[in-house]
Each structure stands twice: as C-alpha cells, then as structure tokens.
Image (cartoon, grey):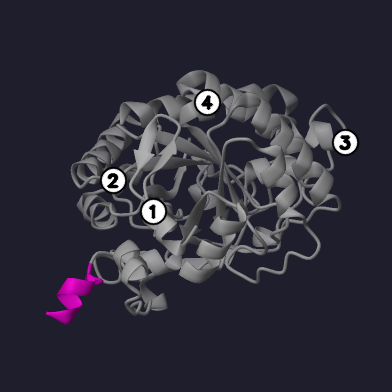
Amino acid sequence: MTDANLFEPYALGPVTLSNRIVMAPLTRNRAGPGFVPGDLAVEYYRQRATAGLIITEATQISQQGQGYQDTPGIYSPAQIEGWRRVTEAVHEAGGRIVLQLWHVGRISHVDLQPGGAAPVAPSAIRAETKTFVNNGFVDVSEPRALELEELPGIVQDFRNAAANAISAGFDGVEIHGANGYLLDQFAKDGANVRTDAYGGSVENRARLMLEVAAGVAEEIGADRTGIRLSPASPANAIASSDPQSQFDHIVDGLNALGLVYIHVVEGATGGPRDNADFDYGSLRRRFKNTYIANNGYDRALAAARLEEGAADLFAFGRSFISNPDLVERLKTGAALADLNPATLYGGGAEGYTDYPSLDAAQA
C-alpha cells in the first residue's frame, strides 16, 4: 500500500467517497439572522467539495444547545432550507457532506440561552473557559444541572435534528460527542458528579451518549450516523479520571449499534499528539466499521497510519480553511497556503471564501 491509496475511492456505508481525506468540522461564526447558513456558507462548502467527505461546522440542535455567537442551527424551517442550499451545491460539485449535531451544554452564556436562562450541564460545575459572544471572548456562565426528566427531551432534540438534516439533503450526520460539550461532559467525571442513573460508574456516564446514538441511528439509520470522540483531550476544561475504561465501554456500545464511523481526536484537540497515556488502537480494534483519525495529520503521517491499518479516513482541519483545494495540494505535493488567524471567527468573505485555489494562485 502506498500513499496513493489516500486518494482512491472509499465506501462509507451507502455512499462512496472520492478519497480518504475528510474536512473536519470547523466553527466559523458566520450564520445569518435566525442562525441560518447563507450565501457565503454555500460558496465556502462548494469550494471544498473535493474532500472525500465534508463534516460541517458544529450545528446546534436547539437554541438551548447554542454556545457561541452566529453558529448555525438545524431546528427551524429556515435553517433546514439554508442547509439544503449548501448540500445541493456540494453534491453538484461531486462531494459528500454530513452535518455535525451539537449541544454545547455548559459551554455557553446566558446571552445565548432562551430567556437568558443558565446553560445546562450534567452537574452545576462551571467550566474554566471562554466562549465567543457579543463579538468577543468572555467567561462561560454558571450552568444548572439537568433534571432526570429533561434527558429524554435532549435525546429527542438530537433525533429531530438528524431527521431535519436528512430532509436538508445531507448524506448523514455526525453526533458531537467530543471537546468538552454536553455528551462529553456526561461521559467524564470532571464535569459529571451526578448520583442518579447518569452519573458515577463508567456505564452510567456513558448512558446519555449511547442513548443519543441509538436514537439518531433509529431515526435515520446507523449507516448514516457517525460520532466524534475526544477521549483524552482537555478541550473546554474537561477532565476524566478513567478515559481508557470509559471510552472502551462507549466504543463497544457504538459498535453494537452499528454506527457507520467513529471520528477520534487523538491527543489534545488542536494540540499535541502525545498519546502515551491512551491506547487509541483499543478503540480501533473494538469498532468494526470506519475509523476516522484526527489531529495533526499530514500526507506522510496519514499514509503511514493507513498502511498500518490504524485508520481508514483522515480528518484535516485548519489546512482546509486556507486551502479549498487541499486534496489536490496533498496529492501533488504543492505548498499549502497560510491561514490568517484574525479572520477565523465571524466576519464576511475575507478569510472565508477568498482563499485562492492552486490554479488561481499560480495564474
């Protein structure tokens, strides 16, 4: 096997990807009024349709699920229609695209919550981190603990959002179970000190994530349902005393459900790939369908891991922002364009849809 295999088609459940390069979800804070993706989003995703698979920016399943300014939703008719324009553009360009479903839990601010209410979480423990609201970064608000009777509603919101995504033309969905957001908060005991059926043991802390996965799979099909996990990442001030046993158990449950893929952040999200304290190979061995590897990959590392059989697909994040034709650049060995960090969050076309393709840059 050579690195050319990275650029060959791959069957992901019922869809065929043109290559093994995945565009990772990237929050850009550019949704329009009503949290609807607009014309710029249509162009942004169309430009990147040569990825084997696009995973969209995280998209809230309800207003309660929102944690940052100007992020899109998938719970209103206008949002569904806005996303339908995106999926049509990507499909017309020959791409495949899934929607990442998001509930941020405690990583939010009262200014974003319905009626100015407190954000929700497994336990009333404030995260020592910030969110982006009112055009700036501020401390997250103190959360309240979700009541037991509220949890079926969270599962139903994920189910509804998944159904809306299919209605909008997506090829599937990715459940956001990573990076210190709601499902990850329930799984990790640094944020979850509950004493009911959703706290305490490995099995109890996994319960909500697995219930959401089962509900979404029942709603739209397991072969169109993936999930993102970050077992050892400290993103958004999350911590776990037992990540290996916790996520071995979670992945066993996901495998039993027959989900089409797990998308695993290996190491610290956006940080070092120091994996000495976590065996990602254990997750790979336990999960029988597609394994998407994420974090710090380049062509050489992806090719090496593919040859080892350590992963099937490889997610690239920030390099897709400044290189809409990243797949072609990786394939030909062309230099990658630099990212402008000042335009990552919020704004308009600058730093969003104006990065040139290789052909345009050389013209």
- Residue 348: percent from the left, percent from the top? 26, 65
- Residue 25: percent from the left, percent from the top? 45, 53
- Pointer 3 residue: 201
Query: Is there any visible trace of residue 109 in the rendered image?
Result: no
For the residue carrying disc 2, how many other residues have a C-alpha within 10 Å: few (<14), some (14-19), or many (20+)?
Answer: many
- Pointer 1 residue: 70
For the residue carrying disc 3, how many other residues have a C-alpha within 10 Å: few (<14), some (14-19), or many (20+)?
Answer: some
Q: Magenta region: which residues?
A: 354-363
Disc 3 residue type? Answer: Ser
Q: Quadrant of the C terminus?
A: bottom left
7 vs 285: above or below: below
- Residue at the spot x=56%, y=64% of the render? 304
- Could you say which disc has been placed on residue 222 in the image? 4
Sequence order check, earlier mark of 1 and 2: 1
Q: Residue furthest front?
A: 1
Q: Looking at the image, is mark 1 or mark 2 nearer the viewer?
A: 2
Instruction: Kindly state the secondary structure of the residue where label 1 is placed.
Output: loop
Q: Determine the CA span between mark 1 and mark 4.
A: 30 Å
Query: Is there any visible trace of residue 7 in the rendered image?
Result: yes
Sequence order check, earlier mark of 1 and 4: 1
Q: Looking at the image, is mark 1 or mark 4 nearer the viewer?
A: 4
Q: Determine the CA span between mark 3 and mark 1.
A: 36 Å
- Residue at the spot x=83%, y=44% of the render? 245
Would you say 237 lies left or right of 244 here?
left
- Pointer 2 residue: 95
Instruction: Kindly state the secondary structure of the residue where label 4 is placed.
Output: helix
Sequence order check, earlier mark of 2 and 4: 2
- Residue 87: percent from the left, percent from the top? 27, 40
- Residue at the spot x=38%, y=49% of the render? 54
